[in-house]
Image: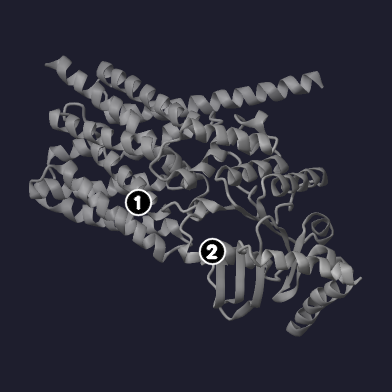
């Protein structure tokens, strides 16, 4: 029984570790890091609504997120030169809505805590199946559209000129992000999911010379954080979501430290030889 | 004297049978209420190495944007291969190296090969995966611009001139028939500039590529291109470089004289 839930947690954690940085790399390089946080808060409203209405909360979170993505794209066109404003507007709306939904007495259940911070115990077969389905959708889509997605991330204007449907590709990317976030909620939690989208990418960018390197390295960082985090949370009985994210932060700090050491060692080496 | 004037006319008569690659018919364009170009009429033929020169703010970059369909004319028509821009669905026939192509986030994780490979997407189609032929063409293009040894280098660590050659390779990877370049020699040192023009001449002669290049560097451009358009709001000259050189002083004083008047007018 206990082993069963650990296996489920590990399996779910590995899938989340692959999914989050895969989408995260494109988002971070497109200066859309904040979209993870926004969609997480939209998901919070969705989860609260789901608990209230008696609908499976991740499904509700996903529906809310997809609507939010469509609204963000629409607003992004209205405020062309202030793209981040569209994200801020949706974030405000989502927090407001979540506040109202959470104040309804039925939604303030203990279940909510597991969505806020993630919970191993909460991971069931249904969650695993949804994660697996999202995993297939995301890997197949990214595998097929890898180069076009790289192109719009690297040179959006030129990609448009070469005839690529840039707006559609943008939308595809954001919908994939919504899928990843809604399905990862149970593991890392609403408040922490965006950190697993950005932190491994931030660490990988310190080393990566090529896009492909950054892609695989970010997944390596995320997998390490998830596996170490799960082990520690099991051993010390810490909250798994928080432990995983703290591991990601630790790996990032270590990376920056090593980078700094290498740089100062090189500078030192140069100054003594000169 | 008569012979020299007749010579290009004879060539032009031959070219009447060939369809122009680019044709602007009475094109006018204004940004809001500021008129940039008035009644532009010009044709660019296959295998031309065409220079567009003019002072700052003369509308020469706008001319290129009109050819790319980035802006639409207020009056007149832009035709590519005899068809209006909107009917040219195959964008891969046109390669483009934008102005300040080298001004990008230098820490972006991308190698030279990854960047050049994006040039293939327009040809291959959105959903097709890169195949061995694509990789071969990418390698060929890098070879052609002399950057084959840099394929796996981080793009942000290269010099301005090297980055520019990578962006040319990226444009070539789409196997274009027409190459448009906007101020390609800005921020590139003189040695790299000379290499750049050698490369353009090679592409023009050996691959038969039609090249259109916007520049403010009249001296160098007139040495390298075979056709020229002098723009400052309207066309002051267009045609063979040899003919331009005969009347260079006159044309240039009119071309730049206009600017002085405009500046004075605003005071």
- In this rendering, the count of numbered labels is 2
Q: Which mark is residue A208?
A: none
Q: Is residue B267 above or below residue A266?
A: below
**Apparent side of residue B67 relative to residue B161 in the rendered image (left or right):** left
Seen at 64% across and 65% down, the residue is B17
Q: Say whether residue B222 is left or right of residue B38.
A: right
Residue A72 appears in which quarter of the rendering?
bottom left
Residue B209, placed above or below residue B87: above
Read off the residue under disc 1: A171
Q: Which residue is mark 2?
A: B70
Residue B114 on image: x %, y %: 54, 36
Residue A251 image-quadrant placement:
top left
Q: Are marks 1 and 2 on the same chain?
A: no
What residue lies at 51% left-to-right and 45% top-to-bottom? Answer: A154
Say what secondary structure mark 2 lies in. loop
Q: Estimate the x, y position of residue A221 in percent, counting from the top left.
A: 42, 26
**SS at mark 1?**
helix
């Amino acid at each position: 029984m206990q082993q069963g839930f650990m296996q489920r947690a590990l399996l779910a954690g590995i899938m989340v570790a692959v999914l989050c940085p895969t989408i995260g790399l494109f988002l971070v390089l497109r200066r859309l890091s904040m979209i993870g946080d926004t969609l997480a808060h939209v998901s919070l409203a969705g989860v609260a609504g789901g608990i209230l209405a008696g609908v499976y909360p991740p499904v509700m979170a996903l529906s809310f997120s997809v609507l939010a993505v469509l609204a963000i794209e629409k607003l992004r066109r209205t405020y062309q030169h202030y793209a981040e404003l569209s994200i801020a507007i949706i974030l405000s709306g989502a927090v407001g809505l979540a506040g109202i939904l959470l104040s309804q007495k039925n939604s303030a259940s203990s279940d909510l805590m597991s969505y806020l911070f993630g919970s191993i115990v909460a991971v069931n077969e249904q969650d695993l199946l949804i994660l697996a389905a999202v995993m297939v959708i995301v890997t197949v889509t990214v595998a097929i559209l890898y180069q076009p997605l790289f192109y719009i991330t690297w040179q959006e204007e030129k990609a448009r000129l070469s005839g690529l449907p840039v707006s559609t590709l943008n939308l595809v990317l954001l919908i994939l992000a919504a899928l990843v976030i809604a399905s990862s909620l149970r593991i890392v939690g609403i408040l922490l999911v965006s950190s697993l989208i950005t932190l491994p990418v931030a660490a990988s960018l310190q080393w990566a010379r090529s896009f492909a390197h950054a892609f695989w390295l970010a997944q390596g960082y995320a997998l390490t954080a998830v596996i170490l985090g799960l082990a520690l949370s099991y051993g010390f009985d810490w909250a798994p979501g928080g432990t995983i994210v703290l591991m990601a932060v630790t790996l990032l700090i270590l990376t920056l430290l090593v980078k700094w050491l290498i740089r100062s060692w090189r500078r030192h080496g140069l100054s003594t030889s000169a | 004297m008569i012979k020299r004037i007749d010579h290009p006319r004879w060539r032009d008569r031959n070219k009447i049978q060939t369809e122009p690659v680019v044709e602007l018919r009475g094109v006018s364009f204004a940004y809001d209420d500021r008129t940039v170009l008035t009644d532009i009429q010009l044709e660019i033929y296959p295998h031309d190495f065409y220079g567009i020169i003019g002072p700052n703010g003369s509308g020469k970059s706008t001319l290129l944007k009109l050819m790319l369909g980035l802006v639409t004319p207020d009056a007149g028509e832009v035709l590519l291969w005899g068809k209006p821009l909107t009917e040219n669905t195959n964008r891969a026939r046109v390669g483009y190296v934008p102005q300040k192509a080298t001004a990008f986030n230098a820490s972006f994780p991308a190698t030279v090969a990854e960047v050049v490979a994006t040039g293939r997407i327009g040809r291959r189609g959105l959903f097709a995966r890169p195949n061995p032929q694509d990789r071969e063409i990418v390698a060929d293009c890098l070879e052609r611009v002399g950057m084959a040894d840099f394929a796996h280098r981080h793009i942000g660590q290269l010099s301005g001139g090297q980055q520019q050659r990578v962006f040319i390779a990226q444009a070539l990877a789409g196997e274009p028939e027409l190459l448009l370049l906007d101020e390609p020699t800005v921020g590139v040192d003189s040695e790299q500039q000379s290499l750049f023009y050698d490369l353009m001449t090679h592409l023009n002669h050996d691959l038969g590529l039609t090249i259109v290049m916007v520049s403010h560097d009249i001296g160098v451009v007139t040495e390298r291109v075979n056709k020229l358009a002098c723009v400052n709001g309207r066309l002051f000259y267009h045609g063979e470089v040899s003919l331009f050189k005969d009347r260079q002083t006159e044309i240039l004083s009119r071309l730049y004289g206009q600017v002085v008047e405009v500046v004075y007018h605003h005071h």
